[in-house]
């Protein structure tokens, strides 16, 4: 009886509710459906907004009589580019100019990321050094570099190279065949002739061996604890095998020496001041941020790990390499991705020193000569977006590989 | 997200304003009280800041002339400094009303970019400047040279054509503006600097030792420089065009800033009378005052006064009139009649 009463009551309540028609206010009162409705409205508003902007832009452009379209990409670009990794003349189309620019961007981004990472890890570890002088030097480097805008670093590097190095006619020659001038650094370039295939094979064999050896060494170490000297062996193999191949094949490689002819050096490999300034400035700037990330990552690893390692008699350099850094990497990697993306995007400052990256070619000169602002900007936008997403995907894959796996 | 939305909102408001502001440029200019004039970021003789911090120069004076035509004195002008790469966007987006920035009149700029060149105020051509110590006396000896070049200009295209046609190699060193081009050239990053011959003379004049530099004799292109406006407002285009013509005609008829006041009260020459508002209603046809040409000449002087004051033989730039002389003096400067 006692139990029955409430049951009765709730039954009445339900019947009462079902008696009435479905009420809109119930949907609003429900927390889940309310938030769903708000989100749908927000998305609709946003889409309407974007559609309105796009429509307005197209309308305004057609009012101005401006035609849009990507056909201009196949017209001759008519301008020359001084730094290029692929063939290009002023008769090549704008699309190829964009490609030349893209490769230049990729070059400076990849080399910048490599160098910045090297600097960053070194400086980050050294800033934690017990050596007072080393630690303070690293602090000065980091604080100076990351607190000055990167554009100033780029202009400073460029100014120093162009204004302090000698003119090509009186270029410095630190080593025979190597020249330093304010038009660039010139190095001899090896040319692989037809008879150089043994060298290629030797390099391939060396690489395969090194990879196999590293895997094998790891397996042996896991099983028995014996540590093979992987690095020295790898270096020796990679250097010695191709050298042997070189001496046993007949005159396979000739060298293209840089030589002063008329106004400039001809031949060899030229590292232009524009490229150098951009690459170096981006590297040291981003390197300073990476150093702080690395330092943070190392400090995040419990000190007990180091102490335990020392207690086991593992020497300090191994402790850092085998115990601390692998654990620190889990903290370091996610912000490191950001820095790589920043470096890549900051490379668009190239125009300040006249390095012909993708912003300078399609985003600037092509844009200016054709007046196709929207088209060029949209191409530029998609290129940077694609590159950034690619880097991001790669690094996230790395991150998943090293993150803690719970069994 | 908020910032993102804010950006979108700002952007669309700007676009929206663009739509609203399709009214006639002259009404627009009158209601805001000044002409917004696009000029160079700095080119001695053409657009530079004087010791008092005021913009002066050949191109700047033209802006003042248009200001005087509308407002009666040279004060109604504001300036926007533009690089070679930003100038057309600024004009097309209505940021400026008029571009007077040593800009070359070409087919594609006129037709494809939908701009209206109202005439030519300086007939120029592209040349090279080199250090004398290089021992170069002709542009045909420049094989293998490094050439400083401003990006986004017609000179960049002429340069590529010149070297290709003459089967010579060169290294282009792209530079953003005239100042940087000069410092790179002086630092020896490039062997020669190329731009319009007038610009070279201007730059040379600003070097510490102008005598150490030589302007090579070759002129590799035609560069008719002139002021321009947007397509789509012919009335505004007419005002700018006839301001330029009035400056040229004033020189032709001997009207200058010293005698314009006297001549305005009436002369025997009906053309001068029409121009200075003594006969007919020519000012009203443009929507301007009856004596608008008088105001222009009082503010800036006629073409030859502007030329001599800014870039003529007595200035550090030291350009002679050459083909920019009136057609009566053997040049090609020729304006249609004021009738």
Image (spheres, grey):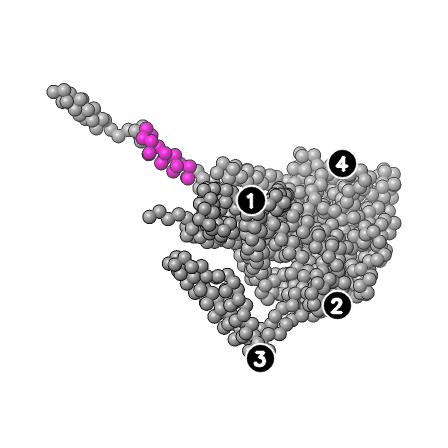
Same chain letter for marks 1 and 4: no
Q: Is residue A30 magenta?
A: yes
Report how far apart the C-alphas of labels 3 and 4 lie in the structure. Answer: 80 Å
User: Alpha-carbon neighbours of circle 4 within 10 Å: few (<14), some, or many (≥20)?
Assistant: some
Same chain letter for marks 3 and 2: yes
Write down the chain letter for disc 2: A
Percent position (x, y) of residue A172?
Answer: 73, 62
**Dot 1 lies on which element?**
loop
**Dot 4 lies on which element?**
loop
Report how far apart the C-alphas of labels 1 and 4 lie in the structure. Answer: 63 Å
Of the pair B75 and A238, the residue shown nearer to us = A238
Of the pair A148 and A216, the residue shown nearer to us = A216
User: Alpha-carbon neighbours of circle 2 within 10 Å: few (<14), some, or many (≥20)?
Assistant: some
Residue range highlighted in magenta: A28-44
Taking the view exactly as shown, the residue that stands out farthest to the bottom is A250
Q: Which mark is residue A262?
A: 2
Pointer 1: what residue? A128
Q: Earlier in the sequence, mark 2 or mark 1?
A: 1
Report how far apart the C-alphas of labels 2 and 4 lie in the structure. Answer: 53 Å
Percent position (x, y) of residue B91?
Answer: 65, 46
Pointer 4: what residue? B75
Report how far apart the C-alphas of labels 3 and 2 lie in the structure. Answer: 34 Å
Write down the chain letter for disc 1: A
**Dot 3 lies on which element?**
loop
Residue A190 visible at all: yes
Pointer 3: what residue? A250
Q: Tell which tag, 3 or 2, sits nearer the viewer.
A: 3
User: Alpha-carbon neighbours of circle 1 within 10 Å: few (<14), some, or many (≥20)?
Assistant: some
Callout 1 touching callout 4 (CB < 8 Å):
no
């Amino acid at each position: 009886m006692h139990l029955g009463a409430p049951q009765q009551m709730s039954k009445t309540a339900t019947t009462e509710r079902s008696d009435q028609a479905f009420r809109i206010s119930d949907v609003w009162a429900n927390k889940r459906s309310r938030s769903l409705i708000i989100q749908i409205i927000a998305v609709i508003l946003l889409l309407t907004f974007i559609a309105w902007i796009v429509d307005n832009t197209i309308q305004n452009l057609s009012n101005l009589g401006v035609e849009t379209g990507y056909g201009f990409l196949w017209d001759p670009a008519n301008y020359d580019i001084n730094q290029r990794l692929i063939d290009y003349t002023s008769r090549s189309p704008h699309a190829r100019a964009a490609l030349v620019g893209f490769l230049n961007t990729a070059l400076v981004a990849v080399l910048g990321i490599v160098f910045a990472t090297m600097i960053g890890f070194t400086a980050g570890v050294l800033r934690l050094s017990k050596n007072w002088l080393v630690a303070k030097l690293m602090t000065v480097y980091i604080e100076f570099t990351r607190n000055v805008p990167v554009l100033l670093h780029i202009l400073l590097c460029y100014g120093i190279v162009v204004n302090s190095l000698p003119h090509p006619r009186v270029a410095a020659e630190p080593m025979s065949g190597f020249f330093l001038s304010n038009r660039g650094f010139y190095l001899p370039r090896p040319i692989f002739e037809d008879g150089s295939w043994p060298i290629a094979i030797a390099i391939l064999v060396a690489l395969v061996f090194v990879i196999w050896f590293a895997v094998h060494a790891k397996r042996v170490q896991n099983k028995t604890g014996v540590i093979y000297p992987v690095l020295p062996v790898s270096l020796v193999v990679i250097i010695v095998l191709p050298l042997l191949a070189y001496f046993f094949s007949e005159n396979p490689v000739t060298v293209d020496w840089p030589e002063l002819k008329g106004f400039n050096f001809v031949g060899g490999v030229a590292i232009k001041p524009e490229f150098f300034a951009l690459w170096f400035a981006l590297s040291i700037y981003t390197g300073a941020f990476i150093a702080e990330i690395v330092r943070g990552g190392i400090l995040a690893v419990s000190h007990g790990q180091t102490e335990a390692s020392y207690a086991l008699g593992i020497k300090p350099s191994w402790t850092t390499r085998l115990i601390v850094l692998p654990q620190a990497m889990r903290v370091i990697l996610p912000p490191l991705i950001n820095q790589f993306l920043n470096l890549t995007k900051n490379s668009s400052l190239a125009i300040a020193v006249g390095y012909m990256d993708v912003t300078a070619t399609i985003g600037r000169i092509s844009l200016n000569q054709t007046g196709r602002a929207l088209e060029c900007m949209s191409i530029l936008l998609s290129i940077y977006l694609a590159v950034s997403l690619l880097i991001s995907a790669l690094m996230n894959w790395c991150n998943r590989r090293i993150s803690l796996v719970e069994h | 997200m908020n910032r993102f939305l804010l950006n979108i909102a700002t952007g669309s408001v700007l676009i929206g304003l663009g739509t609203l502001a399709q009214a006639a440029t002259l009404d627009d200019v009158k209601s805001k009280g000044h002409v917004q004039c696009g000029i160079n970021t700095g080119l001695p003789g053409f657009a530079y800041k004087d010791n008092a911090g005021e913009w002066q120069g050949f191109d700047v004076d033209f802006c003042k002339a248009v200001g005087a035509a509308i407002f009666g004195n040279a004060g109604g002008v504001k300036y926007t400094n533009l690089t070679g790469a930003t100038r057309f966007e600024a004009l097309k987006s209505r940021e400026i009303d008029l571009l007077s920035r040593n800009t070359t009149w070409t087919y594609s700029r006129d037709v494809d970019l939908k701009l209206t060149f109202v005439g030519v105020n300086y007939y120029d051509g592209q040349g090279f400047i080199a250090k004398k110590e290089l021992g170069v006396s002709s542009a045909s000896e420049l094989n293998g040279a490094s050439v400083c070049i401003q990006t986004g200009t017609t000179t960049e295209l002429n340069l590529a054509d010149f070297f290709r046609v003459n089967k010579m190699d060169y290294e282009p060193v792209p530079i953003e503006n005239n100042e940087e081009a000069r410092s790179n050239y002086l630092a020896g990053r490039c062997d020669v600097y190329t731009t319009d011959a007038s610009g070279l003379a201007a730059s040379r004049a600003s070097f510490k030792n102008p005598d150490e530099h030589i302007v090579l004799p070759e002129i590799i292109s035609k560069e008719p420089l002139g002021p321009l406006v947007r397509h789509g407002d012919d009335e505004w285009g007419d005002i700018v065009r006839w301001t330029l013509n009035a400056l040229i005609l004033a020189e032709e008829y001997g009207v200058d800033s010293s005698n314009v006041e006297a001549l305005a009260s009436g002369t025997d020459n009906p053309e001068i009378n029409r121009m200075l508002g003594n006969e007919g209603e020519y000012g009203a046809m443009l929507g301007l005052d009856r004596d608008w040409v008088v105001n222009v000449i009082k503010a800036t002087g006629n073409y030859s006064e502007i030329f001599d004051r800014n870039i003529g033989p007595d200035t550090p730039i030291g350009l002679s009139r050459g083909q920019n002389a009136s057609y009566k003096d053997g040049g090609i400067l020729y304006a249609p009649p004021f009738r």
